[in-house]
Amino acid sequence: MADKGYGYEECEATADWLLARTGVRPAVGIVCGSGLGGLADMLKDQVAFNYEDIPNFPQSTVHGHAGRLVFGTLKGRSCVCMQGRFHLYEGYPVQKITLPIRIFKLLGVDTVMLTNAAGGLNRDFKVGDIMVIKDHLNLPGFAGVNPLSGPNDERFGARFPCMSDAYDGALRQMAMHVGRELGYGDFLKEGVYCVLGGPSFETIAESRMLHKLGADAVGMSTAHEVIVARHCGMRVLALSLITNQAVMDYDSEAKANHEEVLETGTRRAAQLERLVSTMVTKMELNNNNNNYAGDADRGTLACQRKPQ
Ligand SMILES: O=P(O)(O)O[C@@H]1C[C@H](O)[C@@H](CO)O1
């Protein structure tokens, strides 16, 4: 695997490169979805890196994904934020698009908060709803496209990780609670996210099928990152912004398009940012922002927490 540029040693080299250039020791890692890059702007005392300058990092190629890794603090809590993520349809192997999640782990991140833009399949969902993801359908995974395929490196995690608890129950509950407290009750939902490879949007028959399979929203990201985050033991919260209704009716004139996705992102950005930042200030973190072992302290299980 190492020769493909996303093995343990590459991740370690990238984490060390970053840690040598910032004093921030992040406990929370945030991933911004399409049009939701404003989340990174919430961070104070920023130290930011362009993806093109970070060793082993892929490059963002999609409009609405700026391509910057931003370190900083959110109400005093140390965070790192991907302002732009990678997708299968950009042509990267699934192991490469999820490499930043492993780097999060080696930076000391304990909790990952992911956001995405998604098409609504659940007929009760409206454009602008925020869906707390409770589970996913990984359709590329059914065809063997899984970020954990290939040799397993035990320093990251077990060969056969459990996924029935992928989306942390306590964080989901907290998101619903905080969201209601912020007055978002009318547009806060819970549901199942389905990932496809993209970049073409779904046909009507495909959307109908996904809905029948139990998906509430459809998108082109997130599930791969969640699998990798859970493999190496980080907690996960993921939020979908319903940016458009998936077209499920042959009489409909609606057509999915990326511009609508970005526009909805802009309209809901402030509320999503508030939900994420309020959660960061309220959540219990296990690493006290300070658990990075560094080269000298790394044992054979380098992903293990340093004792507090
Ligand atoms: O990165 P996310 O999942 O938010 O991006 C979605 C899926 C496609 O990349 C794009 C389609 O408009 O938005």
Image: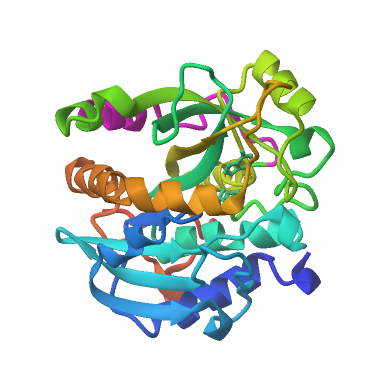
Q: Position of residue 169 (x, y in %)?
A: 38, 25
Q: Position of residue 46 (x, y in %)?
A: 27, 76
The residue under the point 65% across, 29% down is 247
The quarter of the picture where the N terminus appears is bottom right
**Total numbered circles:** 0
Q: Position of residue 289 (x, y in %)?
A: 26, 60
Q: Nearer the viewer, residue 100 or 117?
A: 117
Whether residue 125 is situated above or below residue 49 in the rendered picture: above
Task: Say left or right for 119 vs 277.
Answer: right
Read off the magenta span. Answer: 159-177
The picture quadrant where one finds residue 95 is bottom right
Whether residue 202 is situated above or below residue 176 in the rendered picture: below
The residue under the point 61% across, 31% down is 246
Q: Position of residue 116 (x, y in %)?
A: 49, 46
Magenta stretch holds residue 168: yes
Task: Say left or right for 291 vs 222.
Answer: left
The picture quadrant where one finds residue 212 is top right
